[in-house]
Every structure is written in structure tokens, then in C-alpha cells.
């Protein structure tokens, strides 16, 4: 009987709908420009397409205001023993709408805030010699009650998931 109850519970959980921004919205809202202004660090896990951990990701970000609703952010990423620097230009373009460009981005990212959630997709230009050419970065940001931000990134090429990254970002100081 107990096994049947667990099986029923797992079936119900497996059939539940994913968390959508309107369900996550809660109180307050997420302002990416405000959050990434100043010093922010992260720690996370890189996962293969099966969800198995394959590496640690850390970042150190410093965002400097360039206007009333815009920042220039320098992000130092440490992934798989390699370090790279990404320079973002991030700005609010409307109510709950944000755009960004970066030194290794193809085009412009445009995203939307819904309560405490933020979503955007953008194309990362891979390093010369990388056979994948460019990959799509699909990112969901979730502001937690303690002020930290969880970011879930799915990296894909032609719709095929390559890796995922789960990171927690926190303000320093």
C-alpha cells in the first residue's frame, strides 16, 4: 500500500505544470539593472544534458551606472578551469523590458520581467575554432526572498540541449 501511495505521488508530481513567472511572481519585483549595479558574485553547477554535474561555475561581476536605468558590467567567469571576461551594456528600455549587448554576444538580448522572474534568450559567439560556432543561451532569473538571484541557463544549438547551468548570485557588501 505504501509503495502505491508513493507511486501515485510521483505520478502527480511528474504531471504537474512547470513553475511559470505568474505563479512565481509573489511580492516585489526584480530589477536586473539595480541588482547588477555594484559588486555581485555567483557560484553554480554546470550540468550535462542528462542533468549530471560536470563542473563548477563562479563569477565576479562589477556593475557601474552609465545612466538612470543602465549599467556597464564587467563579468569575470571561471568555468572548467578557464577564465573569460564578458563586458555587458545593460539597460531598461520600457516598463519591465530590458536589453543588453556583450562583447561575445551575437546581436542584442531583450528580456521581460514578470514579478520576481526575468527571462531572455541570446546568442553566445563561441571562441574561434569551436565547432559549435554560436549557441543559444536561454536564461531565467528568479529573485529570492533573501535578495539572492537564482539563474537557470540552458545552452542549446539548433534546439538541442547541450548543457545547463544553475547559479546563485549575491550582492557583496
Image (spheres, rainbow, N blue to C red):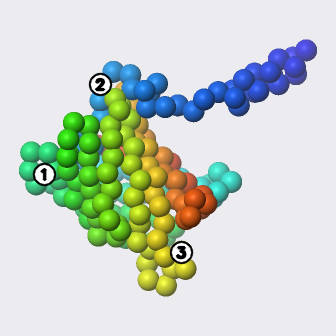
- Give the residue number, with chain letter if any, for mark 1: 65
**Does residue 163 lie above or below 115 as drawn?**
below
**How far from the left and from the top, in percent, is residue 131?**
55, 80
Nearer to me, 15 or 51: 15
- Callouts 1 and 2 close, C-beta under 8 Å: no
* Disc with the residue nearer the chain's start (1 vs 3): 1
**How far from the left and from the top, in percent, is residue 91?**
20, 50
- What residue is shown at x 26% (from left), y 52% (from top)? 99
Q: Quadrant of residue 105?
A: bottom left
Q: Secondary structure at mark 2?
A: loop
Q: Residues within 10 Å of mark 1 (few under 14, many from 20)?
A: some
**Does residue 52 lie above or below 119 as drawn?**
below
Left or right relative to 88: residue 129 = right
Inter-mark Cα distance, 1 to 3: 34 Å
Residue at the farthest right position: 1
Inter-mark Cα distance, 2 to 3: 39 Å
Residue at the farthest bottom position: 129
**How far from the left and from the top, in percent, is residue 46?**
55, 56
- Give the residue number, with chain letter if any, for mark 2: 28
**How far from the left and from the top, in percent, is residue 137?**
45, 58
Q: Residues within 10 Å of mark 3 (few under 14, many from 20)?
A: few
- Callouts 2 and 3 close, C-beta under 8 Å: no
Left or right relative to 36: residue 57 = right
Q: Quadrant of residue 92?
A: top left
> Would you say residue 24 is visible in this rendering?
yes
- Give the residue number, with chain letter if any, for mark 3: 132
Nearer to me, 45 or 112: 112
- What residue is shown at x 33% (from left), y 21% (from top)? 27
> Would you say residue 172 is visible in this rendering?
no
Question: Which quadrant holds the C terminus?
Answer: top left
Report the mark closest to the observer, 1 or 3.
Answer: 3
Amino acid at each position: 500500500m505504501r509503495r502505491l501511495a508513493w507511486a501515485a505521488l510521483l505520478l502527480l508530481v511528474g504531471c504537474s505544470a512547470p513553475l511559470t513567472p505568474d505563479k512565481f511572481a509573489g511580492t516585489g519585483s526584480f530589477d536586473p539593472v539595480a541588482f547588477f549595479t555594484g559588486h555581485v558574485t555567483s557560484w553554480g553547477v554546470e550540468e550535462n544534458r542528462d542533468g549530471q554535474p560536470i563542473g563548477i561555475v563562479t563569477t565576479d561581476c562589477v556593475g557601474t551606472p552609465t545612466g538612470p536605468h543602465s549599467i556597464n558590467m564587467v563579468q569575470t567567469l571561471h568555468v572548467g578551469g578557464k577564465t573569460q571576461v564578458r563586458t555587458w551594456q545593460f539597460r531598461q528600455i520600457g516598463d519591465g523590458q530590458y536589453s543588453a549587448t556583450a562583447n561575445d554576444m551575437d546581436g542584442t538580448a531583450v528580456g521581460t520581467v514578470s514579478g520576481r522572474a526575468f527571462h531572455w534568450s541570446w546568442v553566445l559567439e563561441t571562441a574561434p575554432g569551436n565547432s559549435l560556432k554560436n549557441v543559444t543561451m536561454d536564461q531565467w532569473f528568479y529573485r529570492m526572498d533573501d535578495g539572492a538571484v537564482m539563474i537557470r541557463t540552458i545552452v542549446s544549438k539548433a534546439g538541442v540541449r547541450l548543457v545547463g547551468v544553475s547559479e546563485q548570485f549575491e550582492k557583496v557588501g
